[in-house]
Amino acid sequence: MSNPNAASIKEQNKSAASSLLKKNIRKFLNNKLAVFGLVVVVVMTLACIIGAIMGVDYATPDLTNMKAAPEAGHIFGTDTIGRDLLARVLIGGCYSILIGVFCAVLSSVIGAALGAIAGYFGGWVDSVIVRISEIFQAFPQLVLVMMLVAILNQRGLGNLLFIFVVTGWMTTFRMVRNEFMSLKNETYVKVCEAFGMKRSNIMFKQILPNVMSPIIVSTTTNVAFFILQEASLSFIGLGVADSTPTWGNILNAAKSVSVVTNQWWIWVFPGLAISLFVLAINFFGDGLRDVLDPKQQ
Amino acid sequence: MLKFILKKLLLMIPMLLVISLIVFFGLQATGIDPINFMLSPEQLSASPEVVEQLREELGLNDPLIVQYFNWLGNMLHGDFGYSITDGTSIASTLAVRMPYTLELAGYSLVLSAIIGIGIGIISAIRQNGIIDYIGRVLAVLGQAVPQFLVGIILIQIFSIKLGIFPAANRVSPDATNAFVDAFMHLFLPVTTLTIGMVAVLMRYARNTMLDVLNSDYIKTARSKGIPEWKVYLKHGFRNAMKPVLVILMFRIPTLIGGSVVVESVFSYPGIGMTMTNAIVANDYNVVMVTTLIIAATMLVCSFMVDVLNAIMDPRVRLGE
Amino acid sequence: MKKVLALVLAAAMALSMVACGGGSTTSGSTATSGASSAGTAAPASDGTLKLVLSTTDGSSTDDKVPTPWYNRTLPTNLMFRSLFIADSTLNEVSPDLAESYEVSEDGLTYTITLKDGLKWSDGEALTADDVLWSIDAALQTTQVNAIYTSAFKKIAEKSAEGNVITLTLSEPYSSLPQILSQFAILPKHSLENVDVLKLDADTTFWQNPVTNGYYMVGEFNVGNYFTMVPNPNYEGTPAKIQKVTVSYVNDYLTAAQSGNADYLYGNATDLVEAMEGMSNYTSHEVDVLFYKYFIFNMKGTDGTENAAMQNVEVRKAIMEAIDRATLATLYPSATVLNSGVPDSHPAYNGFSYTFDAEKAKADIAASGYDMSRPIRICYYNNDQTSIDLINTIVYYLEQAGLTVESTLSNDGTTDLFTTRQYDIGFKGKSSFSLDEWYSEYLSTDALFQNIWGGDTAFDEAIATYSAATTEEEKNAALKTLQDLEQEKLYKVPLFTVGNYVFTSSNVKIPEGVTFCNPLYSCDLDFANWEMA
C-alpha cells in the first residue's frame, strides 16, 4: 500500500527545518553584537587574505625610514626597521588567524572524536582517555613548546600548531563526553542499537549531530584563545621565529619600553588588530550560542 | 565518599609518573649535554679524562632508564637536585619562589572570584542595568587584550606616569611596613591576572544565575511570597554557585600559565620566571622539577574539582 | 546592545589613549617625553644610591651577588678590589691593593708588594696568599672571563714572601698589569673549601660575601635586591654614600623611569634614546671596543666539519651581501669595522668589505653553494635592536638568493659547537683590548678551537703581537693579524657600537670623573660621590 502522505511529511520536515533555519538567522541578525562580530571577523580575514594575494611588501626594511609615524605612504606607520606596519599587520593576520582557526578546528575534531568514544563506550576506554586528557591538562604548555623547539631545533610554525592542538582538545573532549554519557541512554540510541546499526554510525551519525552546537560555539571561542596564546608565547620568546610576522611577533615590539612610550603606532595597531579580532570572534560566538544552544544563554 | 577520594588520590600517582616520564625522556631527546654547562670549555677540551670521570660520577653513563629511576628516587627523598647552569640547589630556589607565586595566584583567584561572581550575579539580577553593561564590557575587554599588554600598560600608567606602584620585584629594599610593601608590589601583577580571570568568571556566573533565576523552583519560591533578597540568596546564589566553583577550579591552570607571563612582565621572582629562565637557558634539571610541580598542582586542582562535583552531585560518585 | 557596543569601543579608545597619552603627544621628539615623566618618576633620594642588575642577560641570577670574575659591574666593583686600579682608558694603572710593582728587564718577572694591614670585611688579614689562591682558582673555575685565564696561563711560577708576590711569566706579556687591574681578589679563607668549578654558585658565600672594597652586603633578599653597607675594615677613604641598594630587574629603562636606578648603562638604541630624553639623567658616552660580529662555524677539534661554510667564497659573498653602513644606523652611534682594528687606528691595514648586492648574488651562485640549504644564524641578545639587526641581515641575505633561519639561542658561542647546528653566530663583545679580540684566534683558545678546528695559522702572529713592546712593533704585528683575519674570514666584525653610562640627578659625581667600559673596573673616585 502506498502512502501518499509520506512525501508530504518529508516536505513538511524540510520546510520546518528551513523555517527553523530562517528563524535562527533572523534571531542571529537581531543580535547586533553578533552581527558586528561576524562582519568584523569577515572583513578582517578578507583584508588579510587580499593583502597576502596582492603581495603587500611586509619584509623590506628601510632603515632610512624607521619608526615613522603614520602618514600617507604608510597608513599605520613603519616599525623599528622601517617595514610598513599595515602590510605586516595584514600578513600577520593571515598567520594568526590561520593559527587560531587551524588549531581550534583540529583540536575540536580530536576532542569531539575522543569525547564521543569515551562517552559512548564508557568503562576502561573512558577512564584511559580521561586520564590521558588529565595528563595533558596538567602539563605546562610552555615546557612542551620548549622541548619541541629543542628537539627540532627550530621555532617553526609547525611546532606551535602541533602543541596547540595537542594541548587544546581537552575542553571540547570533556563537554562532548558528558553529552554522550547522557545521550547514549536516550531511547533513539537504544532503538538504533536494537536495529543493529554500526557503533561508529550511531556515535558519529546519530549522537554527534546533537552535540554539534556547543562544539561549534566552543570552536569559535577557541580561535580567539589560540590567537591570544600565540601572542603570549611570542612574548616569552617561545613563539614562532621572529621572521614570521604573526600578530604576536609584531606586538613583541611592545617589550621595548621606549617603543611603548614614544612610538605608539608600533604596538597599538597590532594590539588593536588582536583585540578587535578576539572581541569580534567572542561576540560572534556568543551570538551563535544564543541561536544554537538557547539553554546555555 | 572516602573511597572515592582515596581512589582519585591513588590515580594521581600513575599520572604523575607518566608526566615525569614524558618530561624526562623528552628532555633527554633534546640532546642537551649538561657537562657543557658544568665545565669550562677550557676543561672540556683540555682533559677528556676529567670529563669522563665527571660523567661517571653524575651517572650520565648509565642507561637512561637507570638515570630516570635514580632521579625519581632522589625526588622522592626530597632531593630535587641542582641547577645545571649555576649549580644552586633547586629545593632552595623553590622554597623562595613557590610562596611568591602562590601569593600572586592565590590573591588573583580570590579577588577574581569575588569580583567576577559578584558582578556576574548583580548583572543577572539587574539584567540590562548599568552594572550589567559595564560588567559585560569589562568582561569582553578583559578577554580580548593580551595579558602582557595589559601588564605593560599598567606599568606605564601606574609606575611610570603616576609613580604610585613599583614596576618590578616583590620586596623593596627600603620597605618600612611589610604589609604595605607587599600590597604595593602585588597590586599591579594581581590586577593584571585578575582582569583576565574576572572576564570568564563574570560571564559564567551571570549565565548560570540567569538560568537558575528562570528555573521553575525560583518561580515557585517567588510565588510563595518569599522576599526577593531571600530568593536570590538562598535559592539563586546557592544553586548557581556549584557550577561556578567548578569553573573557578578549572581556571587555575590558566592562572598558572598567566602568572608565567605576568611574572616576566613585572620582574616578579616567582616560579614562573624561574621556569621561563630555565627553559631559555636549557637548564633541564630545573625544567623537570618545575614542570612536575606545576603538573602536580594541576592534578590536585582537578582532583578537587572531582571531589567538589562528587559532593554536589552524588551521581558522579556512582558513575565512577 | 548598541549601548554595549558603544561602551566597548569607548573603553577600548580610553585604554589606548591613556596608554599612549604621554607618547602620542611626544612622538618624534624624545626630549619632551623625558621631561613629562621627570616630574613624577624620580622621587628625591633619601641618601641611598640605587643600582640595578639585569637578570635577563644571562650573566647574573637574582639569588646571589654576581661573580666579579666574569663581568665587572658597578655593585661588585664597590665590593671587590684588585691589585691595581685602572684609569678610564683601562690602560694606565695605579696601585690599589698593591703598594707598588716592578718588572724585570726581560719583562718576565713581576714583583708586586701588597699594602700593609689590609683586611677583609670579616676582619681577617688580606695576604699575598689570597692573591695566589685567586689566580689559581680563576684558572680552574667555570664562570670566568677569558682575559684572566689567557693571561694567567702565561704565569709559569708564582711565589709569595710576606707582602711580596713574585710572578714569573713563560713569555713576555706587557698587558699583565692591566689584566691585574681588573682581576678581583677573593678571600681564600672563605672559599678554599668550596668546589672550585662552581665557585660563583656558592650562594652561602655570594649572598653575604667577604669583601675588600668600600662596602659589604647588608641584607640579601633573594629574587628582589641586596643592600650594601660600608665595610668597617676598609682601609682607604670611606665612601660618603652610606647605603646602596641593588635591585634585580628585567628592564633597565623601566627601572630608570620608575625612579629606581641612579646608574645604568647600555648600547641598545631604544634604551639610549629614551634615557637621553630624560632630563633628570646625565649621559656619558664611554670609550669602549664593543664589537658586533659574526663567527662562522667551521669545524671541531675532532675534525667534524660544517661542510656548508668551508668555502671561503661563500663567507666572502655573505659579507658582500650585507650593507653594514646602513645596519649601523640601527645603533645610536656605530662605526663600521673591517677587522678587529678600528679604521681610525694607525695600524688599520686599509682593506674593506664593500656592499654589492648584485655581486654577492653572483658570487654565491658561482661558489656552488646549495641554495636550497638554509643558512642558520643564531644570536643571543634579546633586545629590540638586536632583533631588528638580525631581521635586517636576514633580509639582506635573502636578497642574495639565500634562505635564512635565525634562532635566538642562550649562548651564541658554545651553542655553535655543542650542537653544531648553526652556520653563523652573531655576537656582541665588550672587548677589554685589541689583544682580547685577536687572542680568540689562538689555536688553543678554549672556546674557539672548537669552532675553527684549532687552526694554528694565527698563533705566531699573536705571539709576536703580545711580545711586542714598542708601538711600531705592535702596529706591524696588528697588520699581519688583520691580513690573516681577512684571508681566513673566521670571524668578521660588522661594527663597534657606542656605549653609554647614565647617572641620575640624585647622585652628584665629583668633577673630572670619566666613566670607562661599564663591564670593567676603573677609578671613578667613588669615595666622593654624594647623594643630592
Image: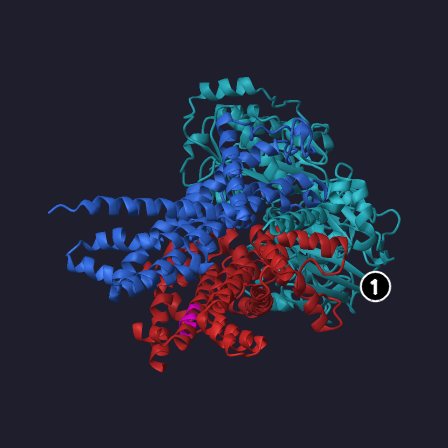
Residue displayed at 27% across by 58% down: A117
Residue B303 part of the magenta-drawn span: yes
**Closer-to-camera residue (A201/B174):** A201
Chain ID of residue with mark 1: C
Quadrant containing the C terminus of chain B is bottom left
The answer to which quarter of the image holds residue B196 is: bottom right
- Across and down, in percent, residue B40 comes to 52, 52
Residue displayed at 63% across by 33% down: A81
Tell me the colour chain A is drawn in. Answer: blue
Residue C380 can be seen in this image: no
Q: Secondary structure at mark 1?
A: loop
Q: Say if C148 sits above or below C379 in the image.
A: below
Q: Say if A70 sits above or below B175 in the image.
A: above
Residue displayed at 56% across by 55% down: B261
Q: Say if B285 sits above or below C291 in the image.
A: below
- Across and down, in percent, residue A240 comes to 49, 43
- Across and down, in percent, residue A176 comes to 35, 58
Quadrant containing the N terminus of chain B is bottom left
Q: Which chain is red?
A: B
Residue displayed at 76% across by 72% down: B176
Q: On the rendered structure, is A240 left or right of C40?
A: left
**Closer-to-camera residue (C253/C355):** C253
- Across and down, in percent, residue C486 comes to 57, 27
Q: What stretch of residues is rendered in magenta?
A: B302-307
Q: On the rendered structure, is B150 left or right of A247?
A: right
Tell me the colour chain C is drawn in. Answer: cyan
Amino acid tagged 1 = Asp
Can you name the residue that lies furthest to the bottom here?
A: B2
**Closer-to-camera residue (B123/A124):** B123
Residue B7 part of the magenta-drawn span: no
Residue at numbered disc 1: C46
